[in-house]
Image (cartoon, coloured by chain):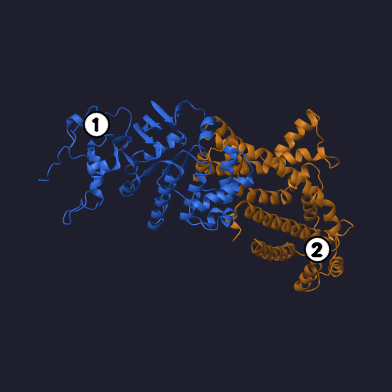
Amino acid sequence: MLRLIARRLALGVLVALTVMTLAFLLTRLSGDLAVSIAGPQATQADVEIVRKAYGLDRPLYVQFFAWTGRAMVGDFGQSYFFKDSVANLIQKRLPITITLGLVGLSLALIVSLPLGILAALRENTWIDRGVTLFTMVGQAVPSFWLALILMIVLGLQLGILPISGTGTWQHFVMPGIVLAFTAIPALTRLTRSGMIEAMASDYIRTARAKGLSRARIIFKHALRNAAIPVVSIAAVQLGFMLGGSIVIETVFALHGVGYLGWESIAKNDFPVVQAVVLVLAVFYIGLTLLADILNALLDPRLRTG
Amino acid sequence: MSAILEVQELQVTFGRTAAVRGASFRVEKGQTHCLVGESGCGKSVTALAVMNLLARGGQRSAKRMSFAGTDLTSLSDREMARLRGNRMAMIFQEPMTSLNPAFTIGSQMAEVLTRHKGGSRAAALERAAELMARVGITAPGMRLGQFPHQLSGGLRQRVMIAMALMCDPELLIADEPTTALDVTVQAQILRLLASLKREFGLSILLITHDLGIVARVADHVSVMYAGEVVERAPTAELFRAPQHPYTRGLLSCVPVPGRVQRDRPLGSIPGVVPAIGPGFAGCAFRSRCAHADETCTRAIPRRPAGEAHDYLCRLEPDWAELQPA
């Protein structure tokens, strides 16, 4: 178990380093940074001043190591646009994104686990087909559209939820629902197929032969095994939710990390871009590691690996 | 003698396919009853039907199916679940996959006792350790904390047997319990079942395709073919004077000391068990039988052939084998 964690951790560090390199190089590939920072009206002399001021005249490898060296200790430099340090900016925005991600994932699990189990137990009935139809529609609906519909219905017509901002917990309900919908179809289908497979297995026949109650057979013996792939995918989905909530954060004016990333790309605030990419990647790596650990806890066969 | 399990005219269908067509047999108290037949003849389905464990889509009906005086056909699912694992237990052909990979051996064994008899988990684990020692598992204390993947197939089957014994059942149904195991382990498991029968006063319904196993452990045998019991007899009687052409065919396929002659090859039965659809009448074996004639398409009488011995065929008892020309 410890060896497994150590190995995954080492792998995670390597991935993080790769992401750092890519984030650094890609911002440089997008054109001459000094030109884009100085703006369209700048003269050649202005551009040269900017180049010197931001240290962009140094060789690329010097810039890279200077940046990675400071990033290691949490110093991502100053934002060009916001008059604040990058670290501070991210620290302020992160709770919003994490709250949104957790609300989204919780809602997704609350909906998709029961639906998946129900569909599996009623395989090939109209209930099962209804659930499958629901997941297909859910997959097809674009999140910005769903967001607007919810705003119109819940926010404007019924007036029960605020449509933008981050003041109270109610502000997270609608974005949470929209975000949940990005994960519900996959998680529901995975739960369904996992449960169908488990319920048809020999160990469930044994559990029935032991005379166990139906609830114990379904929720202990079958679900425990069906949950293993669901946990992996849920962790990956949470990663997507944290990084991929840009659209939703924008629509609902939630100033989270995704929104920050979008703003800084638009404004060529590349220290922020690099840091956002790295922070989201680290989250992603951490979640994958968490999924591996959870899976090892759920499936004893993985513990020795 | 009284029967622990009596099955009369059991029918099991999956959609339009009849898997069991009027199977009848009795398992006497304290005896081992073997259901024997080749693959696809309905042995396992019969056992699963008795336990009410048929896969989805399986429909069962019977004129009579009673366990220790209780009519199994009238029990609700809930009442049936209270019998299973408690007064009637079952072990399966697939020891490698029959235990849940996610839980320890101890937890899977203990829950049988706490479910049916109540009591603490600690007491249940203690009983589990005792039974594991009884079925020949060394270091049971350590095994309780292990997971199925850490055990060999033979050990897993022993665990299944110990688990079946947790509530001290009256009837053990064993569906090909040794088929997936290698020969030395097979012999150990069979010896174990025989000694458990004596020690616990267990009645056993053993399902097998292996006549060698039948000869070693059975008190009474029912030969199944295409969902019917075509011949029933005490074991010694069956081997001495088989009546049904299918039984004779099966016996000619295996070398039995004193019966085979050196220069004659072992027999075989051509073809496979046919799938029986609705509206089928007559003898299901006729397409593979050397003695079939037009009367075999009509209803076949069950003929007595001795004490507790009968068979389903148009031929008179002790009919003479046609000599090959």
B114 displayed left or right of B291: right
In percent of width and height, residue A171 lies at: 81, 39
Could you tell me which quadrant the C terminus of chain A lies in? bottom right
- Judged from the image, the secondary structure of the residue bearing numbered disc 2 is helix
Could you tell me which quadrant the N terminus of chain A lies in? bottom right
Give the amino acid type for the residue marked by disc 2 in the picture: Val
Instruction: Write down the chain letter for disc 2.
Output: A
Residue A147 visible to an observer of this rendering: yes
Instruction: Write down the chain letter for disc 1.
Output: B
In percent of width and height, residue A26 lies at: 71, 62
- In the rendered image, which residue does mark 2 sit on? A35
**Pointer 2: residues within 10 angstroms few (<14), some, or many (20+)?**
some
In the image, residue A68 above or below residue B132: below
Give the amino acid type for the residue marked by disc 1 in the picture: Pro
Q: Quadrant of residue A50?
A: bottom right
- Chain A drawn colour: orange
Q: Badges 1 and 2: C-beta atoms under 8 Å apart? A: no
Q: Name the residue located 43 percent from the left edge and 51 percent from the top edge.
A: B192
